[in-house]
Image: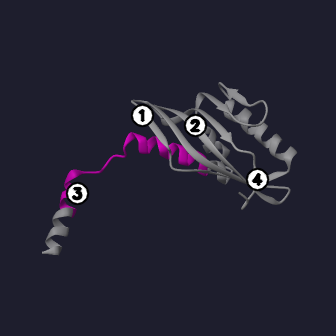
Amino acid sequence: MRLAICGLAALMAVAAGPVKAAPADAAMATLQRFADSFNRGDTKTAGALQADDSAIVDEFPPHQWHGPGAFSAWLGDFAKDAAAKGESDQHLAVGKPTRVDLDGDTAYVVAPALYTFKQHGKPMAESAQMTFALRNGASGWKIAAWAFAGSIPHAAGER
């Protein structure tokens, strides 16, 4: 009997066809690909996930970047800031979102984040909130804007 029920369930799943991901899942997948690409140092992929007219707000000068080339400009300023502070081994973990609002082809996402790095070889951590605005278009979900709002970095394992 158990085998017949399992077989029936499998047949029903095949008959139903492939299950499409919910729009929120697709938008969230873009954010995960962004973090994964950043962590691998794959700036080409991370940049390709940005909308052409993206806007970025972050904690290092000049604190805001927008329009065509915003991600490349942010990346250059990020590298300069990290070098000046002796930072290396950067890693961004974006957590489970605390808010996801989907309205057709736009999304608003707020999620906790943890940014870890080494400063002059010492492991550091910075808790943050990240806010994203995304747009869905012909090439899928793209990040139209994002902001990083972090705490003061501290030695990893403290607090």
The image position of residue 76, as x and y in percent, is: 77, 37
Counting residues from the start of the chain, the first of labels 2 and 1 encountered is 1
In-front residue for pair 63/1: 63
Disc 4 vs disc 1: which is toward the camera? 4
Q: CA distance from mark 3 to mark 1?
A: 29 Å
Q: Secondary structure at mark 2?
A: strand
Q: Which residue is mark 3?
A: 14
Counting residues from the start of the chain, the first of labels 3 and 2 encountered is 3
Question: Which residues fall within the magenta stretch?
Answer: 10-36
Q: Which residue is mark 4?
A: 154
Counting residues from the start of the chain, the first of labels 3 and 1 encountered is 3
Counting residues from the start of the chain, the first of labels 4 and 2 encountered is 2
Q: CA distance from mark 3 to mark 4?
A: 51 Å
Disc 4 vs disc 2: which is toward the camera? 4
Counting residues from the start of the chain, the first of labels 3 and 4 encountered is 3
Task: For the residues labelled 3 and 4, say whether their Cβ atoms are less than 8 Å apart.
Answer: no
The image position of residue 86, as x and y in percent, is: 85, 50
Q: Secondary structure at mark 1?
A: strand
Q: CA distance from mark 4 to mark 2?
A: 22 Å
Residue found at x 65% / y 26%:
68
- Tell me if residue 26 is in the magenta stretch: yes
Q: Which residue is mark 2?
A: 131
The image position of residue 152, as x and y in percent, is: 75, 45
